[in-house]
Every structure is written in C-alpha cells, then in structure tokens.
Image: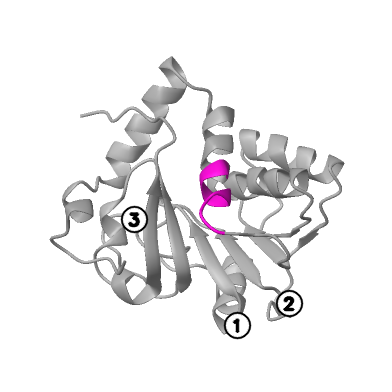
Amino acid sequence: MKPQIGCAEYKNAISVKQMRESDAYTIQNLISGRELMYRAAQGVYASIPWEGKKIAIVSGSGNNGGDGYALACILAGHGMMPHIYRTSEKFSQDGLYYYKQALQMGVPADIFSAEQNFSSYDILVDCILGTGFHGVPRGLAAAAITAINRSFSFVISVDINSGLNGDSGEAELAVCSDLTVSIGYYKTGLFLGRAPELIGDLVNVDIGIVLKK
C-alpha cells in the first residue's frame, strides 16, 4: 500500500527517539542486539521470494548494514549467494559478527565503487543508512543511492529508505524502493514528506521490541 497520512499505520507510528529507547530497553532487559538483528533479517527474507534471483546487498557502517549482513547469511543458508557491497570500512559490533559469518559461508563482498552498475541484479537490498540519519548523504553512500536509483532492479529498503529522515520524511537524496520493510514499529518519517513518492509497498516486521511509552 502507498503510505498515507491518516491511515491506521500512521496513527501508530513512533518517533526515531522512541524507537531507539525501545530498542535499547529491549536489548538491556530481554533480547540481545544480535538476536534482534537476525530477526530483522528473517523478516526481510520472508517478505518476498528470492529463489533464482541475482541479489546484491548494499550496506553501510551501522546496524542497518548489519541487518544486511545477517540477511546475507540467511540467503546463503538457503543456497542463494548474494553479493555484498560496503559503503564504509566501519562496522557495528553485531554487524561485524554477521559480516564475518557471511564471509565464512562464501558470500562475496567488496567495497562499493562509484563506477558500480547494479542493473544486472534482479534484487537490490538497501541497508546503507538507518532511521537515525539526518542531512544529505555524502561520499560512497550518496554514490550508492544514486546507483540504486539508476538500476532497473527490484529495490528493498530495510527499515527505512536510505537518506530519508526517520521523523519528517524529508530527503534531498534518498533510495526509491519498490518495498520498504520497517523493523519493530513504523516510524513517522515513513508517511510524511517525500515518503509517499519514494516508497512503493510498505510493511512492518515485529521482532519483539518492547515499546517504551
């Protein structure tokens, strides 16, 4: 469905701050961050059929990138070998765990190059920038977003379209997705600003995060 202000999903959407607080509370008291990351990846995996497709996962430095690495592990475990393109040399702690696991499973990985053409891929998974991003993407992140938008691939954004403000939905440069898989709870930025023009279908995956009021 196209995101629309006033729909039930928007009324239940939360701020990025509330999402972060809820995530932190859940990790501290109930579920490890590593397990939450894997559950997020499972939710993305369950969102579409992947068999027989040529897949690339484009990941950044944070936990959003970690979701992509965990997804790579799941795909490899089902006999599908995606190609990872990294827009940063940095990793989150849990993201590094799944990145190393993906490499051990034989998943190819490269640093993204500005000359990269993604048009040969059937599916592109956008895990570059998360809900906490504000401002205008720069460097390899910006180049990767541009390359994704120039492709003819089916694009899945994990949690939020990279470059989109998680609270306001504003964006100067952002991924245009065919499907966005929100993680935990919908964020207000998925319904406001430029979100309706950038997001095709929108779904949410419940991974067990306890909402902090």
Figure quadrant of the C terminus? top left
First reached walking from the N terminus: tag 1 or tag 2: 2
Q: Which residues are magenta?
A: 42-48
For the N terminus, the image quarter is bottom left
Crowding around mark 1 (Cα neighbors within 10 Å: few <14, some 14 to 19, many 20+) is some
Please tell me which of labels 3 and 2 falls first in the chain.
2
Residue 113 visible in the current orientation: yes
What residue is at 54 percent from the left and 79 percent from the top?
Answer: 149
Residue 164 figure quarter: bottom left
The percent coordinates of residue 6 (x first, y second) are 13, 61
Residue located at (37% from left, 61% from top): 202
Q: Are marks 3 and 1 in contact (CB under 8 Å)?
A: no
Q: Callout 3 environment at 10 Å: few (<14), some (14 to 19), or many (20+)?
A: many
Q: Secondary structure at mark 1?
A: loop
The answer to whether one can see residue 87 in this image is no
Question: How many numbered circles does the render carry?
Answer: 3
Q: Is residue 179 left or right of residue 83?
A: left
Which residue is at 64% across, 61% downward? 58
- Residue at which label 1 appears: 152
Inspect the image, locate mark 2, and give the three-letter code of the amino acid beneath it: Gln
The residues tagged by marks 3 and 2 sit, at their Cα atoms, a distance apart of: 27 Å
Marks 1, 2: nearer the viewer:
1
Q: Are marks 1 and 2 in contact (CB under 8 Å)?
A: no
Q: Residue at x 21, y 66 (%)?
A: 4
> For mark 3, what is the residue?
166
For residue 211, which quarter of the picture?
A: top left
Q: Which residue is mark 2?
A: 116
Residue type (three-letter) at the residue carrying disc 3: Gly
In the image, which is nearer the foreground, mark 3 or mark 1?
1
- State the CA–CA distance, disc 3 to disc 1: 26 Å
User: Is 109 covered by the magenta stretch?
Assistant: no
At mark 3, the secondary structure is loop
